[in-house]
Amino acid sequence: MEVIKSFLSQHVHVSDEDWQIISEKFVKSNIPKKTVILKSGNVENNIHFLEKGIIREYIPKLQSDLTFDFTFENQFFSAYWSFLHRSPNQYQMQTLTETVLWSINYNELQEIYQKTVIGNVIGRLTAEGLYINKFKRELSLLKDSAEERYLRLFEEQPHLIMQIPLKYIASYIGVTPQALSRIRKRIT
Protein backbone atom coordinates (compact mmCIF):
# COMPACT_ATOMS: atom_id res chain seq x y z
CA MET A 1 0.00 0.00 0.00
CA GLU A 2 2.91 2.38 0.50
CA VAL A 3 3.38 2.63 -3.26
CA ILE A 4 -0.18 3.96 -3.60
CA LYS A 5 0.24 6.36 -0.69
CA SER A 6 3.46 7.66 -2.21
CA PHE A 7 1.78 8.08 -5.61
CA LEU A 8 -1.20 9.94 -4.12
CA SER A 9 1.02 12.12 -1.92
CA GLN A 10 2.67 13.49 -5.05
CA HIS A 11 -0.66 15.09 -5.94
CA VAL A 12 -2.54 15.71 -2.69
CA HIS A 13 -1.98 15.71 1.07
CA VAL A 14 -3.26 12.42 2.51
CA SER A 15 -4.28 12.74 6.17
CA ASP A 16 -3.88 9.79 8.51
CA GLU A 17 -7.68 9.57 8.86
CA ASP A 18 -8.26 9.47 5.11
CA TRP A 19 -5.41 7.01 4.59
CA GLN A 20 -6.91 4.65 7.18
CA ILE A 21 -10.17 4.53 5.23
CA ILE A 22 -8.51 4.32 1.80
CA SER A 23 -5.98 1.64 2.75
CA GLU A 24 -8.71 -0.67 4.05
CA LYS A 25 -10.49 -0.67 0.68
CA PHE A 26 -7.71 -1.79 -1.68
CA VAL A 27 -7.05 -5.51 -2.21
CA LYS A 28 -3.65 -6.81 -3.31
CA SER A 29 -3.38 -9.51 -5.99
CA ASN A 30 -0.36 -11.37 -7.32
CA ILE A 31 -1.25 -12.48 -10.83
CA PRO A 32 0.74 -14.84 -13.07
CA LYS A 33 2.03 -13.91 -16.49
CA LYS A 34 -0.44 -14.18 -19.42
CA THR A 35 -3.57 -14.08 -17.24
CA VAL A 36 -6.70 -12.42 -18.62
CA ILE A 37 -7.91 -10.17 -15.81
CA LEU A 38 -10.95 -8.80 -17.64
CA LYS A 39 -12.76 -10.59 -20.46
CA SER A 40 -14.68 -8.89 -23.22
CA GLY A 41 -18.37 -8.80 -22.32
CA ASN A 42 -17.79 -8.59 -18.57
CA VAL A 43 -18.45 -5.48 -16.50
CA GLU A 44 -15.34 -3.81 -15.05
CA ASN A 45 -15.86 -3.76 -11.29
CA ASN A 46 -12.48 -2.33 -10.25
CA ILE A 47 -10.00 0.42 -10.63
CA HIS A 48 -6.49 -0.99 -10.33
CA PHE A 49 -3.11 0.40 -9.38
CA LEU A 50 -0.25 -1.46 -11.04
CA GLU A 51 2.59 -1.85 -8.57
CA LYS A 52 4.59 -4.30 -10.67
CA GLY A 53 4.26 -5.70 -14.18
CA ILE A 54 2.77 -4.82 -17.55
CA ILE A 55 -0.87 -4.98 -18.64
CA ARG A 56 -2.01 -5.22 -22.26
CA GLU A 57 -5.44 -4.02 -23.40
CA TYR A 58 -6.65 -5.58 -26.62
CA ILE A 59 -9.56 -6.56 -28.81
CA PRO A 60 -9.44 -10.30 -29.47
CA LYS A 61 -9.56 -11.21 -33.16
CA LEU A 62 -9.48 -14.60 -34.88
CA GLN A 63 -6.27 -13.95 -36.83
CA SER A 64 -4.44 -11.55 -34.54
CA ASP A 65 -5.46 -9.44 -31.56
CA LEU A 66 -5.57 -5.65 -31.81
CA THR A 67 -3.46 -4.25 -28.97
CA PHE A 68 -4.38 -0.65 -28.26
CA ASP A 69 -2.80 0.11 -24.90
CA PHE A 70 -0.25 -0.94 -22.31
CA THR A 71 -0.20 -0.05 -18.64
CA PHE A 72 3.11 0.12 -16.84
CA GLU A 73 4.11 0.24 -13.18
CA ASN A 74 2.83 2.97 -10.87
CA GLN A 75 -0.24 3.77 -12.94
CA PHE A 76 -3.96 3.48 -12.29
CA PHE A 77 -5.92 1.65 -14.98
CA SER A 78 -9.39 0.34 -15.62
CA ALA A 79 -11.87 -0.35 -18.39
CA TYR A 80 -13.17 3.00 -17.22
CA TRP A 81 -16.21 3.39 -19.45
CA SER A 82 -17.48 -0.03 -18.33
CA PHE A 83 -16.63 0.83 -14.71
CA LEU A 84 -18.55 4.11 -14.75
CA HIS A 85 -21.57 2.93 -16.73
CA ARG A 86 -21.74 -0.54 -15.14
CA SER A 87 -22.03 -2.05 -18.62
CA PRO A 88 -20.20 -4.84 -20.50
CA ASN A 89 -16.67 -4.07 -21.62
CA GLN A 90 -15.69 -4.38 -25.29
CA TYR A 91 -12.07 -5.50 -24.86
CA GLN A 92 -9.82 -7.65 -22.71
CA MET A 93 -6.96 -7.00 -20.29
CA GLN A 94 -4.09 -9.42 -19.86
CA THR A 95 -0.95 -9.51 -17.74
CA LEU A 96 2.20 -9.75 -19.84
CA THR A 97 4.46 -10.37 -16.85
CA GLU A 98 4.16 -11.46 -13.24
CA THR A 99 1.96 -8.71 -11.86
CA VAL A 100 1.13 -7.10 -8.51
CA LEU A 101 -2.15 -5.16 -8.50
CA TRP A 102 -4.00 -3.18 -5.89
CA SER A 103 -7.70 -3.05 -6.74
CA ILE A 104 -10.70 -1.22 -5.38
CA ASN A 105 -14.23 -2.13 -6.42
CA TYR A 106 -16.95 0.26 -7.47
CA ASN A 107 -18.89 0.22 -4.18
CA GLU A 108 -15.77 0.66 -2.03
CA LEU A 109 -14.72 3.63 -4.17
CA GLN A 110 -18.12 5.24 -3.68
CA GLU A 111 -17.63 4.83 0.06
CA ILE A 112 -14.23 6.57 -0.13
CA TYR A 113 -15.88 9.44 -2.01
CA GLN A 114 -18.43 9.81 0.80
CA LYS A 115 -16.23 9.28 3.87
CA THR A 116 -12.95 11.04 3.08
CA VAL A 117 -11.92 14.61 2.51
CA ILE A 118 -9.70 13.76 -0.47
CA GLY A 119 -11.75 10.96 -2.07
CA ASN A 120 -13.25 13.12 -4.80
CA VAL A 121 -9.85 14.66 -5.54
CA ILE A 122 -8.35 11.18 -5.94
CA GLY A 123 -11.23 10.19 -8.22
CA ARG A 124 -10.78 13.31 -10.31
CA LEU A 125 -7.00 12.82 -10.56
CA THR A 126 -7.47 9.18 -11.58
CA ALA A 127 -10.06 10.10 -14.22
CA GLU A 128 -7.84 12.90 -15.51
CA GLY A 129 -4.86 10.55 -15.72
CA LEU A 130 -6.87 7.99 -17.68
CA TYR A 131 -8.15 10.72 -20.00
CA ILE A 132 -4.68 12.19 -20.58
CA ASN A 133 -3.28 8.76 -21.49
CA LYS A 134 -6.17 8.14 -23.89
CA PHE A 135 -5.81 11.58 -25.47
CA LYS A 136 -2.05 11.19 -25.95
CA ARG A 137 -2.57 7.80 -27.58
CA GLU A 138 -5.25 9.09 -29.96
CA LEU A 139 -3.20 12.14 -30.88
CA SER A 140 -0.17 9.97 -31.54
CA LEU A 141 -2.19 7.70 -33.84
CA LEU A 142 -3.36 10.73 -35.82
CA LYS A 143 -0.10 12.64 -36.16
CA ASP A 144 2.88 10.34 -35.59
CA SER A 145 4.39 7.72 -37.84
CA ALA A 146 4.63 4.13 -36.66
CA GLU A 147 8.36 4.67 -36.16
CA GLU A 148 7.71 7.71 -33.96
CA ARG A 149 5.18 5.75 -31.88
CA TYR A 150 7.70 2.94 -31.43
CA LEU A 151 10.47 5.34 -30.43
CA ARG A 152 8.22 7.11 -27.92
CA LEU A 153 7.20 3.82 -26.32
CA PHE A 154 10.85 2.80 -26.18
CA GLU A 155 11.87 6.16 -24.65
CA GLU A 156 9.12 6.11 -22.03
CA GLN A 157 9.57 2.50 -20.88
CA PRO A 158 12.98 1.23 -22.10
CA HIS A 159 13.43 -1.35 -19.35
CA LEU A 160 9.91 -2.71 -19.68
CA ILE A 161 9.38 -2.70 -23.44
CA MET A 162 11.88 -5.55 -23.77
CA GLN A 163 9.37 -7.75 -21.91
CA ILE A 164 6.59 -7.17 -24.47
CA PRO A 165 6.37 -9.60 -27.40
CA LEU A 166 7.06 -7.83 -30.69
CA LYS A 167 3.71 -8.89 -32.18
CA TYR A 168 1.93 -6.86 -29.47
CA ILE A 169 4.17 -3.84 -30.02
CA ALA A 170 3.54 -4.05 -33.77
CA SER A 171 -0.22 -4.15 -33.21
CA TYR A 172 0.01 -1.25 -30.74
CA ILE A 173 1.84 1.02 -33.19
CA GLY A 174 -0.41 -0.07 -36.07
CA VAL A 175 1.92 -2.13 -38.26
CA THR A 176 2.61 -5.75 -39.08
CA PRO A 177 5.38 -7.59 -37.22
CA GLN A 178 7.39 -7.52 -40.47
CA ALA A 179 7.08 -3.73 -40.72
CA LEU A 180 8.17 -3.41 -37.08
CA SER A 181 11.21 -5.51 -37.88
CA ARG A 182 12.11 -3.08 -40.68
CA ILE A 183 11.62 -0.10 -38.33
CA ARG A 184 13.87 -1.70 -35.71
CA LYS A 185 16.57 -2.35 -38.34
CA ARG A 186 16.44 1.26 -39.53
CA ILE A 187 16.90 2.77 -36.07
CA THR A 188 19.64 0.48 -34.76
Image: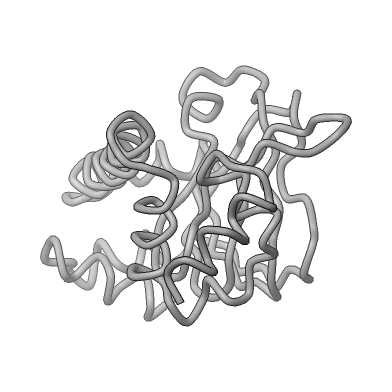
- Note whether 33 is above or below 88 in the view shown: below
- Note whether 154 is above or below 47 in the view shown: below
- Note whether 75 is above or below 110 in the view shown: below
Q: Is residue 17 left or right of residue 146?
A: left
Picture quadrant of residue 65: top right
Q: Is residue 41 left or right of residue 166?
A: right
State the residue in front, 112 or 59.
59
Residue 127 appearing in the image: no
In percent of the image, x 36 and y 40: which residue is there?
Answer: 137
Q: Is residue 144 left or right of residue 60?
A: left
Picture quadrant of residue 156: bottom left
Q: How is the image coloured?
A: one colour
Percent x, y for residue 177?
Answer: 68, 52
Q: Quadrant of the N terminus?
A: bottom left
Q: How many marks?
A: 0
Percent x, y for residue 15?
Answer: 17, 68
- Note whether 101 is above or below 6 in the view shown: above
In percent of the image, x 54 and y 75: which residue is there?
Answer: 52
State the residue in front, 1 or 153.
153
In percent of the image, x 14 and y 62: which residue is there?
Answer: 11
